[in-house]
Amino acid sequence: MALEVVVAVISKSAPRPNGTMRKLLLRLIIACIIIGLATWQAYAAVLPQDRSDAMYHSYQGGGMSIDGPSILLRKKIGNHVSISANYYVDTISGASIDVLATASPYAEERTENAIGIDYLHNKTLMSLNYTTSSENDFEAESFHVGVSQDFFGDLTTLTLGYSKGNDEVGKTGDSSFLKLAERQNYRLGITQIVTKNMILGLSLENISDQGYLNNPYRSVRFLDAGSDLGYRFETEVYPNTRRSNAAAITANYYLPHRASVYGEAKLFSDSWGIDANTFKLGYIHTFGDDWIVELRARHYQQDKADFYQDLYSRSAEFNFRARDKEMSTFNNLSLGASVTYEFQFSAANFFKKSTINLDFDHVTYDYDDFRDVLALDASVGAEPFYQFSANIARFYVSIFY
């Protein structure tokens, strides 16, 4: 079983990084340079494999149901070019607790289309991707360009990436509501084969957002003795700029008997005051020539945004106000498993192999300062803290040719 490592970072956003994060980023950049120059390598750049994937995905939890299909097609043209196309659908129904506090359950559909091209020249792999996303009150488009270069006997791989996206935000029931947002993302990563059994990865990411960055359906609540509930709601107000910085380290270690363990550690900080960390640990084992099983655990924790508050003293108490639970202090724990069955076709067949894959994750969310306003017989500001669990499943078939 081939060793694999994914160098990833938390996809959140932020303006000026704090002193701790700046020191961390500097140290990781230095570490990237040291690892890249002090050791030498083993995997040459290659084009992605020709394949077709058909997937069904499902999310159930927190009052929300999201599911739909996805189709991926990828094909090489000659020895230097590979093209891809992806179609993805989310059918959404229900409503999260944020929405239920002020509105009714809803149903909508989001469709995403993406096309990409990869070009291989010697040890350099260049990629260009364009994605559009559409739903009844939201339109988005983005493009991504990336470069991957192998060094030092193909044991070190350096990757650079840049993405830019534009969003058009609408509001159901208000045809005059139209807000714009722009997002930019810069990425730097290095993957190093340290020994015949171990791969290490380091990555840095910076995201810059500006424009309308909050959700038009989210509201904050403030005390109002004249209300039957003892409080009222008003629209959230966010800053119109945000910068995020994230850093991650990954490791993959190959074990005897065709197994491997991997781990990830990620740190995130943004200009809104959110600091977060993620830790992930996984184990992969191959049984015979056909079965691959993966077990994994992931823990995520974040601190609240500077302008987040569950209950305000009065209307418009501060210039910026948020009560979206994703801006609060919370943590989640995910436990998951994947099973893959692989079978080979005959050498004379156009298709080389196929896999059947099933992924399942159970996630629990616990909030430290976001209260369940739907709880009965609870005084204002003393409602129990919100918590919920979700199940995420993916079933897909892949054919390689």
Image (cartoon, rainbow, N blue to C red):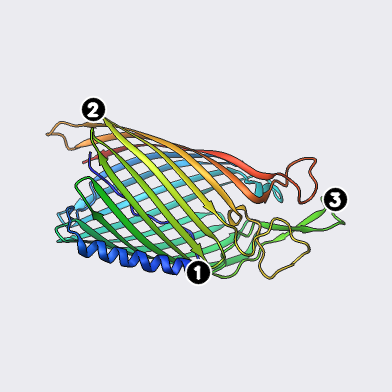
The x, y position of residue 242, in whole percent, is: 52, 68
Q: Quick one: which residue is furthest to the left in this view?
A: 348
For the N terminus, which image quadrant?
top left
Could you say which disc has been placed on residue 18 in the image? 1
Q: Which is closer to the viewer, label 2 or label 1?
A: 1
Q: Amino acid at mark 3?
A: Asp
CA distance separating discs 2 and 1:
50 Å
Q: Which is closer to the viewer, label 1 or label 3?
A: 1
Residue 363 against residue 15 in the figure, above or below: above
- Looking at the image, residue 380 sits to the left or right of residue 287; the answer is right
The x, y position of residue 318, in whole percent, is: 71, 69
Q: Which label's residue is closer to the chain start, 3 or 2?
A: 3
For the C terminus, which image quadrant?
top left
Q: Which label's residue is closer to the chain start, 2 or 1?
A: 1
* Residue 130: quarter of image: bottom left
The residue drawn where x is 58% and y is 54% is 326
The residue tagged with tag 1: helix, strand or loop? loop
Tell me the residue that label 2 is attached to: 288
